[in-house]
């Protein structure tokens, strides 16, 4: 068993009541990624530098405004982890040579979307992990190239309709298992989170914050504009993603994967699908039983391998 | 000071070491590898107090270099050819961060076909990036210009990264006698890195590389970068003068050789200029009034110094070791743009493309270029661009083609 650390976040009322990240950003209403980022930033605090890869959140900092109280560096779509490497190494050099005080040190956080994380940024992430870079990677996963209008990315789920997969069967591929790819590198920590489970998220970010080495977080990010639902339903879509077992909440640590929230009775995946325009073609003009059953079967197969929560 | 017989690669590594570079993000590529191996060895021997990290690509290497410089350490890195092109997105990105550092590029021809030998298409692809460019012709110059490059990059009115360029093989792998200055002397010339306001640490948040909405702030920041690069001209002049005073070696923005009374001038960059100097000596012995002009700075482009150096000449032969497909020599266009319509501009500006993929340019070819200029000056018409390629070279290729097309025999 892993060593149990004492968490500051035992119940909802322990969560920070005020957000550090300023309001009024260019993110869409109901953005699940922004919700997760708010919650993550509250835990990490302002002694951070976010190293950003091209994506929706690149528009958080638009000259001369930033919602962050800490620092920000926009790099490119492919190389944010390398930017984190440069910043971390430079901070370590400055600390070692006494040119900054330990109190001036920063937590270095990569912030990217799933398009970068599972596509052109995967190489630089892989090598940052292999070098043991001391950083946090936060991927907001809205399952497509959201900022450009929800084209298919490596993280798009099977059957989803996107701006580039507009046929009656949606996307024919399957969502890339980034969690397992990252975990296969044996980093310090990997976790999945979602903004609609703030306590689970807070505990994981708290844990990551107090560790060293590569710590990678995927935040499932319901996307009203890209997925086709009303912004007011964002929380419900997120909750359904967990209840249906579409988005397993889990963590990797010391070579083991632990599920932190196992739905006792999983809601059928179609309840989740019916909330979203990107899956509407599975129900209308006629129900596509084949695709729905295939996806449900894969979810069931996944959870049949998972032992119940301790 | 010690005098050593070292390669251009090792001279570049000495530049980094004497500059007390804090950080070297690296990725190996022929013919640059010796630079990073030398630095790695010095770090391992504790002769250099520096951290080196090998990235998985030049794109990441440049990202790490810019990010570390923006955090407040002195950064050195090096690449070549395809590596420079692989990094090109970041080559264009990091100057806007206004975080100074030095990149040594060891020029090598670009694909396709793939080759290891030098020409200048790689470095000229970075021409419009915002990096400043210094071009070297000797191993001594590689070392010295690396030190000057730090001063230039970190100059308060500049604050831009600088590329120091040398030719692969002809400098990278060629040993020449080099005066290696003492650390104390270099410390006097190049003070410790001052990150100014560009650095990340707790307490003073900084946002870097942020998006803009609309063309006004975009144009503003692009013009800022350009004007800072133009400030590099007077800054380079001051720094080179200081260097000359302290070390006794002159590095004006434009090198002129037998130029004052010359009627016809060869114009080129890089190590092949040393071959051209030999040719100039021979032609001078034959009584021809010829000279050589070699810009050391390509960005910022030393317009005024070039106009002065070339004013009143009857003809200039621009030798381009690069090829802009469908146009011709890049330096030829660059030079034409600063001479056109200027008083005293040479009436003849002939273009010669050569030295591609390491191809030698022989003394007889420099002679021929001058003869072309003489004829053109007499006729008053600039001749069409000429691609240097001899009958012998064509025969060599025909032989290879014959082998390639020989039917394969079974058994």
Image (tube, coloured by chain):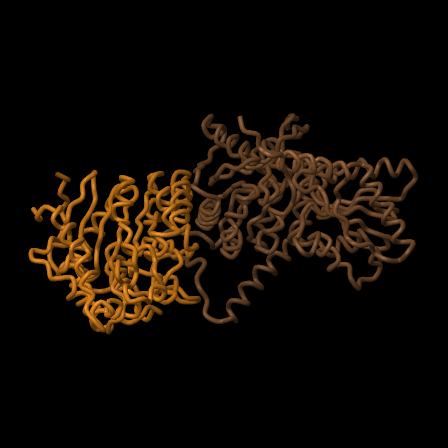
Can you see residue A20? no
Residue B361 found in image quarter = top right
Left or right: residue A255 compared with residue B195? left
Image side of residue B198 versus residue B114, left or right: left
Residue B153 appears at what percent x and percent y?
Answer: 57, 49
The residue located at (62%, 36%) in the rendering is: B404
Nearest to the observer: residue A149 or residue B196: A149
Task: Give the answer, above or below, for where A179 lies relative to A296.
Answer: above
- Does residue B327 appear left or right of residue A123 in this picture? right
| Residue B195 place in picture, x, y as percent | 49, 50
User: Residue at the spot x=46%, y=49% of the render?
Assistant: B63
| Residue at image location 27% in from the left, 70% down from the top | A228
In the figure, the orange chain has which letter?
Answer: A
Asked whether the viewer can see residue A132, the reply is: yes
- Front residue of A255 and B145: A255
Q: Quadrant of residue A160?
A: bottom left
- In this rendered view, identify the residue nearer to me: B271 or B204: B271
In which quadrant will I find the N terminus of chain A? top left
Counting from the top left corner in percent of width and height, residue A82 is at 41, 47
Q: Disc count in the image?
A: 0
Please tell me the colour of chain B. Answer: brown
Give whichever of A44, B392 is nearer the camera: B392
In the image, is residue B265 above or below residue A228?
Answer: above
Residue shown at 21%/73% (left/top)? Answer: A232
Query: Does B319 sit left or right of A218 as displayed?
Result: right
**Percent position of residue B263, x then y:** 88, 49
């Amino acid at each position: 068993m892993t060593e149990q650390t004492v968490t500051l976040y035992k119940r909802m009322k322990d969560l920070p009541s005020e957000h550090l990240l300023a309001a009024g950003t260019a993110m869409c209403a109901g953005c699940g990624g922004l919700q997760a980022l708010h919650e993550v930033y509250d835990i990490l605090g302002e002694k951070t530098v976010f190293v950003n890869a091209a994506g929706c959140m690149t528009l958080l900092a638009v000259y001369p405004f930033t919602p962050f109280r800490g620092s920000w560096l926009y790099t490119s779509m492919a190389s944010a982890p390398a930017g984190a490497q440069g910043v971390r190494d430079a901070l370590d050099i400055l600390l070692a040579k006494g040119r900054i005080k330990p109190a001036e040190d920063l937590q270095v956080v990569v912030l990217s979307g799933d398009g970068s994380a599972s596509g052109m940024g995967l190489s630089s992430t892989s090598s940052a992990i292999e070098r043991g870079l001391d950083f946090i990677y936060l991927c907001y996963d809205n399952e497509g190239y959201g900022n450009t209008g929800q084209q298919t990315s490596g993280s798009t789920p099977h059957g989803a309709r996107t701006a580039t997969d507009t046929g009656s069967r949606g996307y024919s591929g399957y969502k890339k298992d980034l969690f397992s790819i990252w975990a296969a590198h044996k980093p310090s920590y990997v976790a999945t989170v979602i903004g609609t489970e703030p306590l689970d998220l807070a505990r994981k970010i708290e844990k990551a914050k107090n560790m060293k080495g590569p710590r990678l977080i995927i935040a499932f990010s319901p996307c009203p504009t890209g997925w086709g639902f009303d912004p007011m339903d964002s929380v419900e879509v997120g909750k359904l993603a967990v209840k249906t077992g579409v988005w397993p909440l889990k963590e990797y640590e010391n070579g083991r994967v632990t599920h932190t929230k196992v739905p006792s009775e999983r809601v059928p995946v179609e309840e989740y699908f019916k909330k979203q325009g990107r899956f509407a073609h599975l129900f209308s003009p006629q129900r596509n039983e084949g695709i729905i059953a295939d996806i449900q079967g894969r979810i069931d197969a996944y959870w049949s391998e998972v032992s119940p929560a301790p | 000071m010690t005098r050593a017989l070292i390669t251009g690669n090792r001279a570049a590594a000495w530049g980094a070491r004497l500059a007390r570079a804090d950080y070297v993000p690296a990725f190996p590529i022929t013919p640059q590898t010796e630079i990073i191996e030398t630095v790695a060895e010095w770090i391992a021997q504790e002769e250099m107090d520096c951290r080196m990290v090998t990235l998985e690509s030049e794109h990441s290497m440049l990202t790490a270099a810019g990010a570390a410089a923006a955090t407040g350490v002195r950064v050195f890195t090096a690449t070549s050819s395809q590596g420079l092109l692989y990094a090109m997105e970041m080559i264009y990105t990091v100057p806007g961060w206004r975080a100074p550092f030095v990149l040594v590029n060891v020029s090598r021809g670009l694909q396709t076909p793939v080759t290891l030998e030098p020409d200048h298409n790689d470095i000229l692809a970075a021409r419009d990036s915002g990096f400043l460019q210094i071009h070297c012709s000797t191993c001594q110059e590689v070392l010295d210009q690396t030190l000057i490059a730090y001063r230039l990059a970190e100059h308060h009115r500049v604050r831009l990264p600088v590329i120091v360029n040398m030719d692969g093989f002809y400098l990278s792998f060629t040993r020449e006698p080099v005066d290696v200055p003492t650390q104390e002397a270099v410390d006097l010339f190049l003070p410790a890195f001052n990150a100014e306001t560009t650095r990340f640490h707790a307490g003073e948040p900084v946002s870097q590389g942020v998006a803009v909405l609309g063309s006004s702030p975009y144009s503003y920041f692009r013009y800022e970068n350009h004007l800072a690069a133009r400030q590099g001209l007077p800054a380079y002049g001051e720094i080179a003068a200081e260097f000359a005073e302290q070390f006794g070696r002159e590095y004006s923005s434009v090198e002129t050789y037998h130029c004052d009374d010359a009627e016809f001038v060869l114009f080129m960059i890089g190590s092949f200029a040393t071959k051209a100097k030999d040719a100039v000596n021979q032609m001078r012995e034959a009584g021809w009034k010829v000279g050589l002009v070699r810009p050391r700075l390509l960005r910022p482009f030393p317009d005024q110094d070039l106009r002065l150096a070339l004013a009143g000449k009857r003809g200039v032969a621009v030798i381009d070791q690069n090829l802009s497909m469908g146009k011709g020599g890049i330096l030829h266009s660059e030079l034409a743009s600063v001479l056109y319509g200027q008083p005293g501009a040479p009436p003849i500006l002939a273009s010669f493309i050569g030295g591609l993929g390491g191809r030698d340019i022989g003394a007889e070819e420099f002679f021929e270029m001058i003869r072309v200029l003489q004829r053109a000056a007499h006729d008053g018409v600039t001749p069409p661009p000429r691609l240097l390629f001899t009958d012998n070279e064509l025969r060599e290729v025909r032989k290879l083609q014959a082998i390639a097309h020989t039917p394969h025999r079974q058994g």
